Amino acid sequence: MGTPVTVLGGYLGAGKTTLLNGLLDTADGRRIGVVVNDFGTVNVDRRLVRSATADTIELADGCVCCSLRGEVGEVMRRLAARDDLDHVVVEASGIADPTGLSTWGAFPGLAPGGTVVCADVTTVGRKARDRYVGDVVRTQLSRADVLVLTRCDLATPEAVAAAESVAHRHAPGARLLRSRGGDVRAADLLGGAPTVETPATGPVPTGPTPPGDGHGHVTRFVPLAGPVDTTALAGTLRSLPSAVVRAKGVVRTTAGGSVVVQAAAGQVEIASRGPDDGADDAHDPPGVVLVAAGRGAAEALAAAACRLTGLLGARGRDDVSAA
C-alpha cells in the first residue's frame, strides 16, 4: 500500500489555501506532503523550517511543502520516492475538475486517498446556479468524498443551512464538514476514503488534466513593479467588476516589504510576506493575476487592470507601459 494522495479542489476563492494552512498546523505527528500552486499563500512558521530550496520547504515536524512551478510528474515522483510521508495532499486549480489529479493515486508508491472539495457557504448557491461558471462548480461538488463548507463563521445559520442543501443536492454521498477559518483538523480532513478506487495497475498518468476552454474563464497578469498603498489596493479590489471572480498575487507596499493579496466573492485578504516565504521575484514577479468569467470577461479584465495600475505612481505606470 502506497502513500495516500488526497486531491483538494474547489472553485476560485473557496478557501483551499486557508484549509491547507490549518492542515499544516494540525498535523499532530502525521508527516504530510502538501503540493501547492505557489508558496506565497501558505503560512509556514519560519521557525519550523528545516531547509528550503526553490520548490520545496522541509519542515521540522516531517511535513514537506512542494510548489507546482515545475512539472507535476517530477514533483510526484520525488514524493513517491520518499518513505517518510504518511499522506500527500495536492491542490487542484480553482477552475479544474479535481479528478484530473486524482489519477496520481495510481502512481507507483502512491495510493488513492479521496477528494476533498471546499465550498464557500456565502457564495456556493449562487455560483452553482451561475450561467457561466455553474457547470464548473457543480462538477467540482459532485467529485467530493469530503465536502468542506468554508467561511461558516462569516455566514448566518440560514445561509449555512442553504449551503448544506446545495451540498446534499450535488454531492449526496460526500461527508460534510464545517470550517470556521480553516479549523478542520488533519485527522478529520484526511479520513475520507475515495468513492471510486483508482486501479493500482495500468498506465501511469503523464500529467494532470487541464481545464478546458469551455469553462468561459479568462486570465490576465497585471504587473505592479512599484510600491502601492495597501488601503487603496484593498479598496480597488473590492470595487472590481463583478465578472472578475478572483485576484491573487504578490505586491510591494509603500510601507516596505511585500504582501500576498487574495480577493474573491467580495472578500479581500492582504497578508505580509516574510523574506523567507519560499518565493522570490524571479518566480513570483510583483503583480496580480486576475480571473474573469462570463460575458464581458475580457472587458472586465481590461478595466480591472487599468484600476490596479492606477495605484502606481507615474514612474510605476511608465514601467508597466514599457513592459
Image (spheres, helix red, strand yellow):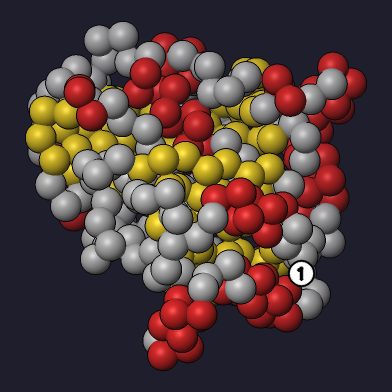
- Taking depth in this image into account, of 40 and 91 the one nearest to the observer is 40
The x and y percentages for residue 256 are 37, 50
- Taking depth in this image into account, of 100 and 222 the one nearest to the observer is 222
Q: For the point 51% across and 80% down, which residue is it?
A: 314
Q: For the point 55% across and 50% down, which residue is it?
A: 230
Quadrant where the N terminus is found in the figure: top left
Quadrant where the C terminus is found in the figure: bottom left
Question: Against 105, is 164 above or below?
Answer: above
**Tally of numbered tags:** 1
The x and y percentages for residue 136 are 67, 55
Q: According to the image, label 1 marks what residue?
A: 294
Q: Is residue 137 visible?
A: no
- Taking depth in this image into account, of 209 and 62 the one nearest to the observer is 62
Amino acid residing under circle 1 = Gly
The x and y percentages for residue 204 are 26, 53
**Residue 254 placement, left or right of 146:** left
- SS at mark 1? loop
Q: Name the residue furthest right.
A: 158
Question: Against 131, is 223 above or below?
Answer: below
Query: Which quadrant of the structure image shows residue 197?
Result: top left
Query: Which quadrant of the structure image shows residue 309?
Result: bottom right
Q: For the point 61% across and 73% down, which residue is it?
A: 310
Mark 1 Cα shell of 10 Å, populated few (<14), some (14-19), many (≥20): some
